[in-house]
């Protein structure tokens, strides 16, 4: 018990020493740092423990204390508090009056605005990495893309929140963060993870708002619209595409893609009149587009043709669906290797299969569907379209042996 009392006494004495002497040390330090002609006192700082304020050792004088609580010179005390908040802690002289103004203070403001811990390569490397991901997206399995995209996204988060940067650099980081979230949303869509699609689209939209990058938000809605369409939520697809169109820079790639998204969303809803109006707008863009384009964020004339094929399937026009699907397939097969789009090719083939099914040729439908499923990139959208085709074939041709065999093949493939 004696040892415990001694320990408590030692701790208490140390606390009392700090309470009594710390104000004196702080006042001396501020006097020296600020170069004051007249030394500050603990009373000037509102920390005089002997002041007649009715407080015990557990309370300092309030920062808003009256002159009687903190000494007899309120002007001197206000000066001390200003120095604590401005000069001492911020290393900047306050510009309260012209007489107090200092060019050095203005220069310090400029210096602080340009201070950064980022290396110029941090931003240029990110730009190159995002371009590389977009360029190789169509030819790389999504599970192989995910680790790289996720690592880069977290790197941007680290630079945003753990490294000092300028406002201009902050804006660039939000753009990179948004575009990487768009890429991750696409990968999540290809993997069939709807929660991740929505989460990364939301993040990309937020980054676009914070950094004033409307095109990033437009690309996020392009993903969201596509995912909703394949998830059998055509109204959500239309809302996302419309929202994206509202912010997309005019005539930009995102705006063109979204105009085609609006058209096929109307088709999926069965709104033929609205589809015709929307598809005319999309075709106006198509006339000036290159036939093929490379990369996740490219836009080309064949993509719009392939969207038309899906639309005519949904609108119950198998003849036009077959013609547009065959046109798209012919173009996709003729592209040089760097312009290959295996996912879009497979979707066009499955649209053609649906057209054959509606036109009474199930064998042709099964043959082209098998080509689609033999592709190098069996992503969730292809799997879903194949399942829809099987359901259609089973409903239309319930006693056809070839249809039954295809259904068994598909069941094994989708279970793998």
Image: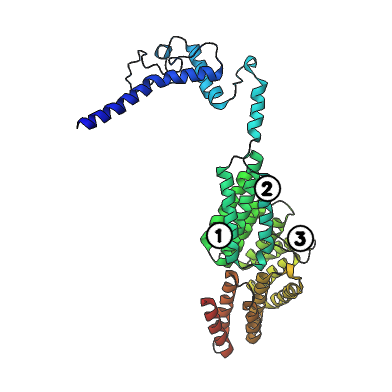
| Element class at badge 1 | helix
Please, is residue 209 above or below residue 230 in the view?
Answer: above
- Distance between mark 3 and mark 2 Cα atoms: 37 Å
Q: Name the residue tied to disc 3.
A: 285
Q: List x then y, in percent, for residue 213.
A: 66, 47
Proximity of marks 1 and 2: CB atoms separated by less than 8 Å? no
Of residue 33 and residue 402, the one placed in the foreground of this image is 33
Q: Name the residue tied to disc 1.
A: 197
Q: Residue furthest front?
A: 3
Q: List x then y, in percent, for residue 342.
A: 67, 71
Please, is residue 202 above or below residue 74 in the view?
Answer: below
Lower position in the chain sequence, tag 3 or tag 2: 2
Q: Which mark is residue 121?
A: 2
Answer yes or no: is residue 311 visible.
no
Please, is residue 138 above or below residue 254 in the view?
Answer: below
Proximity of marks 3 and 2: CB atoms separated by less than 8 Å? no
Instruction: Write down the quadrant of residue 139 in the picture.
Output: bottom right
Give the residue displayed 71% in from the left and 66% down from the top: 303
Lower position in the chain sequence, tag 3 or tag 1: 1
Answer yes or no: is residue 275 visible.
yes
| Element class at badge 2 | helix
| Element class at badge 3 | helix
């Amino acid at each position: 018990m004696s040892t415990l009392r001694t320990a408590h006494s030692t701790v208490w004495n140390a606390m009392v020493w700090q309470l009594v002497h710390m104000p004196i040390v702080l006042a001396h330090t501020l006097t020296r740092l600020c170069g004051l002609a007249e030394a500050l006192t603990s009373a000037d700082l509102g920390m005089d423990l002997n002041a007649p304020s009715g407080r015990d050792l557990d309370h300092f004088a309030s920062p808003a204390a009256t002159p009687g609580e903190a000494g007899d010179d309120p002007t001197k005390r206000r000066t001390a508090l200003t120095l604590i908040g401005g000069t001492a802690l911020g290393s900047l002289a306050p510009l309260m009056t012209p007489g107090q103004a200092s060019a050095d203070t203005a220069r310090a403001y400029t210096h602080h605005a340009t201070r950064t811990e980022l290396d110029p390569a941090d931003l240029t490397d990110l730009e190159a990495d995002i371009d590389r991901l977009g360029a190789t997206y169509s030819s790389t399995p999504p599970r192989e893309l995910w680790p790289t995209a996720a690592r880069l996204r977290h790197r941007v988060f680290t630079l945003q929140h753990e490294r000092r940067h300028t406002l201009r650099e902050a804006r660039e980081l939000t753009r990179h963060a948004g575009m990487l979230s768009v890429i991750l949303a696409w990968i999540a869509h290809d993997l069939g993870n709807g929660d991740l699609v929505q989460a990364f689209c939301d993040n990309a939209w937020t980054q676009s708002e914070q950094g004033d990058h409307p095109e990033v938000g437009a690309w996020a809605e392009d993903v969201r619209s596509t995912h909703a369409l394949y998830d059998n939520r055509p109204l959500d697809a239309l809302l996302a595409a419309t929202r994206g169109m509202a912010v997309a820079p005019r005539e930009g790639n995102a705006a063109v893609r979204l105009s085609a998204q609006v058209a096929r969303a109307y088709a999926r809803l069965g709104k033929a009149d609205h589809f015709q109006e929307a598809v005319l707008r999309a075709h106006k863009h198509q006339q000036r587009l290159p036939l093929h384009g490379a990369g996740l964020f490219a836009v080309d004339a064949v993509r719009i043709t392939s969207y038309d094929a899906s639309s005519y399937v949904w609108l119950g026009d198998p003849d036009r669906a077959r013609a547009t699907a065959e046109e798209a397939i012919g173009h996709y097969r003729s592209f040089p290797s760097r312009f290959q789009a295996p996912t879009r090719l497979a979707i066009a083939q499955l649209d053609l299969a649906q057209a054959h099914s509606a036109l009474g040729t199930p064998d042709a439908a099964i043959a082209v569907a098998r080509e689609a499923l033999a592709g190098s990139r069996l992503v969730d959208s292809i799997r879903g379209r194949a399942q829809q085709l099987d359901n259609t074939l089973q409903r239309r041709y319930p006693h056809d042996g070839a249809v039954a065999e295809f259904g068994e093949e598909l069941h094994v493939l989708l279970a793998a």
